[in-house]
Amino acid sequence: MHRYALKIEYHGAPFVGWQRQTDLASVQGAVEAALARVETRSHNIAAAGRTDKGVHALGQVAHCDMQAEWEPFRLSEALNYHLKPNPVAIVACAAVADDFHARFSALERRYLFRILSRRAPATHTDGLVWQVKSPLDLEAMQNATQVLIGRHDFTTFRSTICQAPSPVKTLDRLDITQVETTAGTEYHFDVRARSFLHNQVRSFVGSLERVGRGSWTAQDLQSALDARDRAACGPVSPPQGLYLQHVTYAQDPFA
C-alpha cells in the first residue's frame, strides 16, 4: 500500500462534522466516497481533527492508503473531481512514509475563530463568522487570555460528552487580534495546542466574548476555570466561526 497525506479545506455547513455517520453527510464520508470512485473498494481514512457540525477547515490533514502508486498532484485532481459538488477541496497531497499518521503524528493543532461585530445582518460572511451586534473590548479580552494559557484542568471548558480520559491539557497560545474588513470589525482568535477537548475552543471564545462585552472580568474567567464545573462556563460560541487552520508535524509533509 502507498500512503498519502491530504490537506483538506471545507465549508462545514452541510455536514454533521468530520466523522463518518450512517446515512448522514460528513466530510470523512465525502472524501472516502471520492476515494472509492478512484480506487473501487472501501476506504477508512484518519484525520488530525474531528471537527463538529458546522465547523470549517482551512488546513485539515488526513491520510489515506492506496493500492496503486499515484503522482500526488494527479490523486488530488482526481479526488477533487469526484468531490463535486460538495464544498470540500484537496488543496495539497503528498506521498508519506507508512508510519505517518495524520492524528497521532501531529504536534500542534491551530484553530481560528472569527467574531464579526456589526448590527446589520451579515451577508457575504453569513455562516462563516459568529456575529455580535456591539464592539468588544479587545484589550480586556487579550488580558483575560493569560488566565487560560498553560497546563490546567479544563473541566469547565469541555463538553459533558467529551470522551477524553483527562480534562488536563496544555494551551500553548491564545492570541486575539482586531481586523478591519469591508464587512465590519472582526476579532480573530488564534488558539494553539497539541490537542483539545471537545468544545474547548468554542467554550473559550464564548467566555472571552463575555469579557469583551463587559459582563465578565478576567477574575470571573479565573473563577470559572478554578470551579472545574461545566456549569461555570460562559455560553458556548456557535460553530460557524470556527476553523481548523493548520496542523503541525515534525516534518511538514507538504513542504
Image (spheres, grey):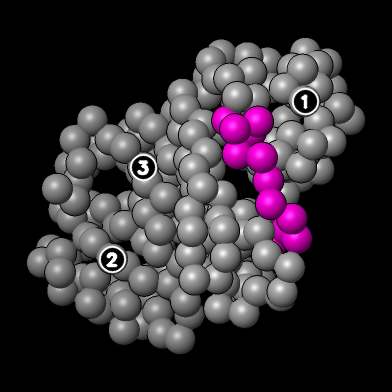
Magenta residue span: 131-142
Label placed on residue 217: 1
The span from disc 1 to disc 2 (Cα, nearest Å) is 41 Å
Q: Earlier in the sequence, mark 3 or mark 1?
A: 1
Q: Amino acid at mark 3?
A: Val
Q: Residue at x 23, y 30 (%)?
A: 250
Q: Position of residue 147 (x, y in %)?
A: 64, 18
Side (left or right) of 172 relative to 105: right
Q: Amino acid at mark 2?
A: Val
Residue 146 visible in the current orientation: yes
| In the depicted structure, whether residue 78 falls above or below residue 227 | below
Depth check, mark 3 against mark 1: the one in front is: 1
- Which residue in the structure is indicated by mark 2? 91
Q: Residue at x 37, y 46 (%)?
A: 246
| In the depicted structure, whether residue 198 falls above or below residue 129 | above
The span from disc 3 to disc 1 (Cα, nearest Å) is 32 Å
Task: Tell whether position 133 is magenta.
Answer: yes
| In the depicted structure, whether residue 215 falls above or below residue 133 | above
